Image (cartoon, rainbow, N blue to C red):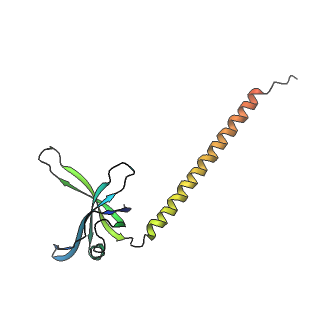
Amino acid sequence: MLNVIAGVVAKDSSIKEVKKGGEKLQVSNNTIYIKTGEGRNDIPVNISAWGETAVEMQKYNKGDSIHFIGAPNDSQYKNDAMDKPITTLGYTVLQIDHDKKLLKEMDTILSKYLEDGKEKKEEKLEKENGKKAGAKKEAAAPEIAS
Protein backbone atom coordinates (compact mmCIF):
# COMPACT_ATOMS: atom_id res chain seq x y z
CA MET A 1 0.00 0.00 0.00
CA LEU A 2 1.28 3.44 -0.89
CA ASN A 3 0.81 6.51 1.30
CA VAL A 4 1.29 10.24 0.84
CA ILE A 5 3.36 11.46 3.77
CA ALA A 6 4.20 15.00 4.89
CA GLY A 7 6.66 15.90 7.60
CA VAL A 8 9.64 17.96 8.70
CA VAL A 9 13.16 16.64 8.12
CA ALA A 10 14.97 15.94 11.41
CA LYS A 11 18.59 16.24 10.21
CA ASP A 12 20.59 17.19 7.14
CA SER A 13 20.38 14.45 4.53
CA SER A 14 23.39 12.32 3.76
CA ILE A 15 23.99 9.53 1.29
CA LYS A 16 25.86 6.25 1.58
CA GLU A 17 26.84 3.57 -0.87
CA VAL A 18 25.99 0.01 0.08
CA LYS A 19 26.42 -3.33 -1.63
CA LYS A 20 23.27 -5.30 -2.18
CA GLY A 21 23.45 -8.53 -4.15
CA GLY A 22 26.86 -7.56 -5.55
CA GLU A 23 25.50 -4.24 -6.80
CA LYS A 24 26.43 -0.83 -5.40
CA LEU A 25 23.40 1.23 -4.43
CA GLN A 26 23.00 4.69 -2.95
CA VAL A 27 20.83 5.03 0.16
CA SER A 28 19.75 7.97 2.27
CA ASN A 29 18.31 7.34 5.74
CA ASN A 30 16.69 10.07 7.78
CA THR A 31 13.87 10.81 10.19
CA ILE A 32 10.90 13.08 9.65
CA TYR A 33 8.52 14.44 12.25
CA ILE A 34 4.83 14.21 11.44
CA LYS A 35 2.64 16.90 12.99
CA THR A 36 -0.17 15.55 15.16
CA GLY A 37 -1.90 18.75 16.25
CA GLU A 38 -1.60 21.60 18.72
CA GLY A 39 -0.25 20.72 22.13
CA ARG A 40 0.75 17.21 21.10
CA ASN A 41 4.15 15.77 20.36
CA ASP A 42 5.16 15.23 16.75
CA ILE A 43 5.75 11.61 15.75
CA PRO A 44 9.22 10.61 14.51
CA VAL A 45 9.18 8.31 11.48
CA ASN A 46 12.28 6.74 9.93
CA ILE A 47 12.54 7.03 6.17
CA SER A 48 14.91 5.59 3.59
CA ALA A 49 15.38 6.40 -0.08
CA TRP A 50 17.30 4.37 -2.65
CA GLY A 51 19.02 5.17 -5.96
CA GLU A 52 17.95 8.38 -7.70
CA THR A 53 15.45 9.13 -4.95
CA ALA A 54 18.32 9.03 -2.43
CA VAL A 55 20.16 11.62 -4.53
CA GLU A 56 17.00 13.80 -4.57
CA MET A 57 16.86 13.61 -0.76
CA GLN A 58 20.11 15.62 -0.65
CA LYS A 59 18.06 18.74 -1.42
CA TYR A 60 16.41 18.50 2.01
CA ASN A 61 18.01 19.69 5.23
CA LYS A 62 17.03 19.83 8.87
CA GLY A 63 13.77 21.74 9.31
CA ASP A 64 12.68 21.49 5.67
CA SER A 65 9.15 20.39 4.90
CA ILE A 66 8.98 17.27 2.71
CA HIS A 67 6.10 15.49 0.98
CA PHE A 68 6.48 12.10 -0.65
CA ILE A 69 4.84 8.90 -1.77
CA GLY A 70 6.12 6.00 0.27
CA ALA A 71 5.61 2.37 1.13
CA PRO A 72 5.44 1.43 4.81
CA ASN A 73 8.00 -0.94 6.24
CA ASP A 74 8.80 -2.14 9.71
CA SER A 75 11.92 -3.03 11.61
CA GLN A 76 12.44 -4.79 14.90
CA TYR A 77 15.06 -4.43 17.57
CA LYS A 78 15.59 -6.05 20.93
CA ASN A 79 15.74 -3.93 24.04
CA ASP A 80 17.57 -5.62 26.94
CA ALA A 81 14.99 -4.29 29.40
CA MET A 82 12.08 -5.92 27.54
CA ASP A 83 11.23 -9.53 26.78
CA LYS A 84 9.67 -8.90 23.38
CA PRO A 85 11.26 -7.17 20.39
CA ILE A 86 10.08 -3.64 19.61
CA THR A 87 8.64 -3.00 16.16
CA THR A 88 8.94 0.44 14.59
CA LEU A 89 7.19 1.82 11.52
CA GLY A 90 9.13 3.47 8.74
CA TYR A 91 8.70 4.39 5.10
CA THR A 92 10.64 3.75 1.92
CA VAL A 93 10.46 6.95 -0.12
CA LEU A 94 9.43 6.12 -3.68
CA GLN A 95 8.83 9.59 -5.10
CA ILE A 96 9.33 13.05 -3.64
CA ASP A 97 6.62 15.63 -4.27
CA HIS A 98 8.98 18.63 -4.68
CA ASP A 99 6.39 21.15 -5.86
CA LYS A 100 3.59 19.82 -3.60
CA LYS A 101 1.31 19.10 -6.62
CA LEU A 102 0.29 15.71 -5.31
CA LEU A 103 -0.47 17.10 -1.87
CA LYS A 104 -2.72 19.78 -3.41
CA GLU A 105 -4.52 17.17 -5.54
CA MET A 106 -5.03 14.91 -2.54
CA ASP A 107 -6.38 17.86 -0.54
CA THR A 108 -8.90 18.61 -3.31
CA ILE A 109 -9.96 14.95 -3.57
CA LEU A 110 -10.34 14.53 0.19
CA SER A 111 -12.22 17.82 0.56
CA LYS A 112 -14.66 16.71 -2.16
CA TYR A 113 -15.01 13.30 -0.50
CA LEU A 114 -15.81 14.89 2.86
CA GLU A 115 -18.23 17.35 1.23
CA ASP A 116 -20.05 14.50 -0.58
CA GLY A 117 -20.23 12.52 2.64
CA LYS A 118 -21.70 15.50 4.50
CA GLU A 119 -24.33 16.04 1.77
CA LYS A 120 -25.32 12.35 1.88
CA LYS A 121 -25.69 12.50 5.68
CA GLU A 122 -27.85 15.63 5.38
CA GLU A 123 -30.06 13.97 2.71
CA LYS A 124 -30.44 10.88 4.90
CA LEU A 125 -31.43 13.01 7.90
CA GLU A 126 -33.97 14.92 5.79
CA LYS A 127 -35.55 11.64 4.60
CA GLU A 128 -35.65 10.26 8.13
CA ASN A 129 -37.18 13.48 9.47
CA GLY A 130 -39.72 13.46 6.62
CA LYS A 131 -40.76 9.88 7.46
CA LYS A 132 -41.10 10.74 11.15
CA ALA A 133 -43.22 13.81 10.35
CA GLY A 134 -45.45 11.70 8.08
CA ALA A 135 -45.86 9.06 10.78
CA LYS A 136 -46.84 11.73 13.33
CA LYS A 137 -49.49 13.14 10.95
CA GLU A 138 -50.98 9.69 10.44
CA ALA A 139 -51.09 9.06 14.17
CA ALA A 140 -52.73 12.44 14.83
CA ALA A 141 -55.37 12.14 12.08
CA PRO A 142 -58.85 11.26 13.41
CA GLU A 143 -60.63 8.20 12.12
CA ILE A 144 -63.58 8.80 9.80
CA ALA A 145 -66.59 6.65 10.50
CA SER A 146 -68.42 5.25 7.55
Please indicate whether residue 72 sits to the left or right of residue 138 in the image. Answer: left
Please indicate whether residue 16 sits to the left or right of residue 33 in the image. Answer: left
Looking at the image, residue 129 lies above or below residue 19? above
The answer to whether residue 2 is visible is: no
Which quarter of the image is occupied by the C terminus? top right
Horizontal and vertical percent position of residue 51: 26, 75
- In this rendered view, identify the residue nearer to me: 99 or 81: 99
**Residue at 66% in and 43% down:** 126
**Residue at 62% in and 46% down:** 122
The answer to whether residue 127 is visible is: yes
- In this rendered view, identify the residue nearer to me: 39 or 65: 39
Q: Quadrant of residue 69?
A: bottom left
Horizontal and vertical percent position of residue 35: 36, 56
Looking at the image, residue 105 lies above or below residue 34? below
Horizontal and vertical percent position of residue 115: 57, 55
Horizontal and vertical percent position of residue 44: 28, 56
Q: How many marks?
A: 0
Name the outermost residue toward the left.
Answer: 80
Q: Quadrant of residue 53?
A: bottom left
Which quarter of the image is occupied by the N terminus? bottom left
Name the outermost residue toward the top.
Answer: 145
**Residue at 68% in and 35% down:** 132
Please indicate whether residue 124 sits to the left or right of residue 20 in the image. Answer: right
